[in-house]
Amino acid sequence: MLMPSPPQSGCTLWLTGLPGAGKTVLARSVASRLRAMGRRVELLDGSELRALDARAGRPRGFTRSDRDEHVRHMGWVARALSRNGVFVVAAAV
């Protein structure tokens, strides 16, 4: 018989900064440590998500509206994951 695991509250840690500032390196380190503590963790990297969107036929440029839409999309994904008990580490410019 399967026993449900105890509920885990999720949250989002959002890292921002200039390109090349080390956001992804820091995010990977934090995610690794959280996993070692037994947490369910998802890493959302802005560059990777942008590339996935482009392959899915939703390319986004770097205009103000494209950047705003990209951040809204990352926020929507982070919120969906965290409300389901996942600790989200997001890194975006």
Image (cartoon, rainbow, N blue to C red):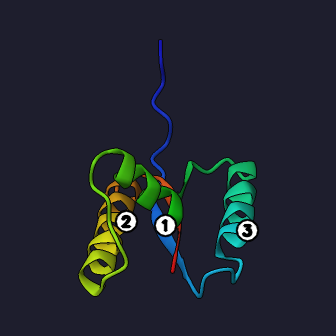
Q: Residue type at mark 2: give it.
A: Met
Q: Residues within 10 Å of mark 3 (few under 14, many from 20)?
A: few
Answer yes or no: do the residues labelled 2 and 1 have beta carbons within 8 Å?
Answer: yes
Q: Residue type at mark 1: give it.
A: Gly
Q: Is residue 47 left or right of residue 27?
A: left
Q: Secondary structure at mark 3?
A: helix
The residue carrying mark 2 is 74
Question: How far from the left and from the top, in percent, is residue 42?
Answer: 53, 53
Question: How far from the left and from the top, in percent, is residue 26?
Answer: 71, 72
The mark nearer the N terminus, 2 or 3, is 3
Q: Is residue 84 visible?
A: no
Q: Secondary structure at mark 2?
A: helix
The residue carrying mark 3 is 25
The mark nearer the N terminus, 2 or 1, is 1
Depth check: give the residue in front, 47 or 74: 47
The mark nearer the N terminus, 1 or 3, is 3
The residue carrying mark 1 is 46
Answer yes or no: do the residues labelled 2 and 3 have beta carbons within 8 Å?
Answer: no
Tell me what residue is drawn at x 61 percent, y 51 percent. Answer: 39
Question: How far from the left and from the top, in percent, is residue 67?
Answer: 34, 78
